[in-house]
Image (spheres, helix red, strand yellow):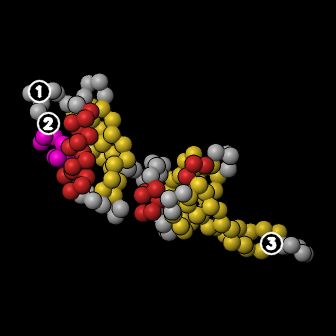
Amino acid sequence: MQEKVENLLSKALKEHPSLFLIDLSITETNQIRVTIDGDKGVKVEDCIAISRAIEHNLDREEQDFSLEVMSAGVSEPLVLSRQYKKNVGRKLKVKTEAGKTVEGELTNVDEEAVTLKWKTREPKPVGKGKVTVQKEAVLPYKEIVEAKVMVTFN
């Protein structure tokens, strides 16, 4: 079952190149869960298309199954570099292996790391008061424990 579903999913994603797989799980009772994301987001129609591509090519008479296709939720952590790329310009909250939390605008993504920028108030080097300074952090993927898009409502 696993191999057949993986092949059908792979074929379906090739037909929808802006979509990509985040997670596939199949339980012992053949509950199939597919989580997808897209470079331009995921529409309900996208989930339906992927679901049909799998469901219409499996035989319930041969093996009973349930199928759930969903998009990666806004509260879910980012897991693939492709997800980071589609979120350039948005604010992220990143937890690192060192236990540090960094919040800032995602300004750059490459194959090795992401770059966050933010403004903060710091004491003036000389005299009293504070000054606003621009900070930047380059965080390699291997050091990121969790990264989430921060949803803001204006």
Q: Which residue is mark 1?
A: 62
Q: Quadrant of residue 26?
A: top left
Q: Is residue 99 visible?
A: yes
Residue 27: image x %, image y %? Answer: 31, 28
Q: Which residues are magenta?
A: 50-58
- Inspect the image, locate mark 3, and give the three-letter code of the amino acid beneath it: Lys
Crowding at label 1, few (<14), some or many (≥20) Cα neighbours within 10 Å?
few
Crowding at label 2, few (<14), some or many (≥20) Cα neighbours within 10 Å?
some
- Inspect the image, locate mark 1, and give the three-letter code of the amino acid beneath it: Glu
Mark nearer the viewer, 3 or 2: 2
Q: CA distance from mark 1 to mark 3?
A: 70 Å
Residue 86: image x %, image y %? Answer: 42, 63
Q: Is residue 140 magenta?
A: no
Q: Secondary structure at mark 3?
A: strand
Quarter placement of the N terminus? top left
Q: CA distance from mark 1 to mark 2?
A: 8 Å
- Inspect the image, locate mark 2, and give the three-letter code of the amino acid beneath it: Leu
Q: Is residue 91 left or right of residue 44?
A: right
What secondary structure prevails in the magenta region? helix
Q: Which residue is mark 2?
A: 58
Mark nearer the viewer, 1 or 3: 1
Q: Earlier in the sequence, mark 1 or mark 3?
A: 1
Q: Secondary structure at mark 2?
A: loop
Q: Which residue is mark 3?
A: 130
